Amino acid sequence: MKKQLITGFLALLVSLSLIAQEQQYLVFEFIKVEPNRVLDYLEYKDFLAEVHKVSKSEGHIEGWDFWSLQSGSDLEGENFQYVTVTYYQDPVKMMNGNDPDQLVDLAISAFPEMDEDQVRNKIRDAMDMRDLAVRSYMVEVARTSDAFEFKPGMLASFDLMKAVEGKFQDYERAEKEVFLPIHQKKIQADLMENWCFLRTALPTGSEAKSTHLTMNIYANYLQFFNSMEYEDMEITEAQQQAVEAGLNSRDQKWVYLATLETLVR
């Protein structure tokens, strides 16, 4: 019996480890750049992409995206122009991802012709030309099953949600059991490329502006608008009620449309 318990416990640990490996951790950074420094910041973006290539090769990150915002509601009056998304394998790497000394070391590896002072000055100048208004640490809760691959020019809708107080679990259940199948149908109908549902990875209080985020990926604007017109003719009355209950369990705070400009994979 004791041997069976030990075997069962080890199996559970292996199972939990595999689940953890399948989870994805993401950091979203909403950025505002001074109008007269946009070209300078886009040059820094190219510099940063090379640095992230080294970061990925060394196992610090899984990937990095640079998105240009097309439209969206202003968050606290800020007119964001860009969003970066950095992907991590585990929460520890995610929390260590903003170590400035690590960034300097990676930059020197990516640009060996630059010395430490030059790298630090370049990073400092970039920090001065932009305002990092919002940084969100997220963990993936659910995603669609597809053969999707990120490519420059793709369109994303970043929908920031806040679960209604007392309905946190109801909302997550609705996204996984009600809305995920709907998005899966859209993908099968070539009306969407990918969808994932994310939860804030750090503890938040009742005053938090958002608790979740959905990332909806489309090949282009034509697919996006066709998707908006989609209506499931086979939906039952019970399923429609489940959709309405799911909508009532969260408050859709902001929606941002963005185009993928640069990526590291």
Image: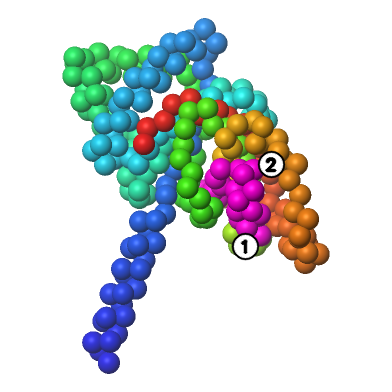
Q: Viewed as shown, does residue 89 lie left or right of 31? A: left
Name the quadrant containing residue 128. top left
Q: Residue at x 37, y 32 (%)?
A: 264
Look at the image and say whether residue 185 sits in the magenta stretch: yes
Instruction: Using a 10 Å C-alpha cutoff, classify the residue at mark 1 as few (fewer than 14 neighbours), some (14 to 19) or many (20 or more).
Output: some
Return the x and y of residue 236 as percentages of the image width and height. 78, 64
Q: Amino acid at mark 1?
A: Glu
Residue 265: % across, % down: 36, 36
Q: Image quadrant of residue 209?
A: top right
Query: Horizontal placement of 247 versus 17: left or right?
Result: right
Residue 9 in the image: above or below residue 4:
above
Colour scheme: rainbow
Residue drawn at (64%, 48%) of the image: 189
Residue 227: numbered disc? 2
Q: Which residue is mark 1?
A: 177
Residue 89 image point, x, y percent: 35, 48
Left or right of 236: which side holds 99? left
Q: Which residues are magenta?
A: 177-200
Identity of the residue furthest to the right in this view? 237
Nearer mark to the viewer, of 2 and 1: 2
Q: Quadrant of the N terminus?
A: bottom left
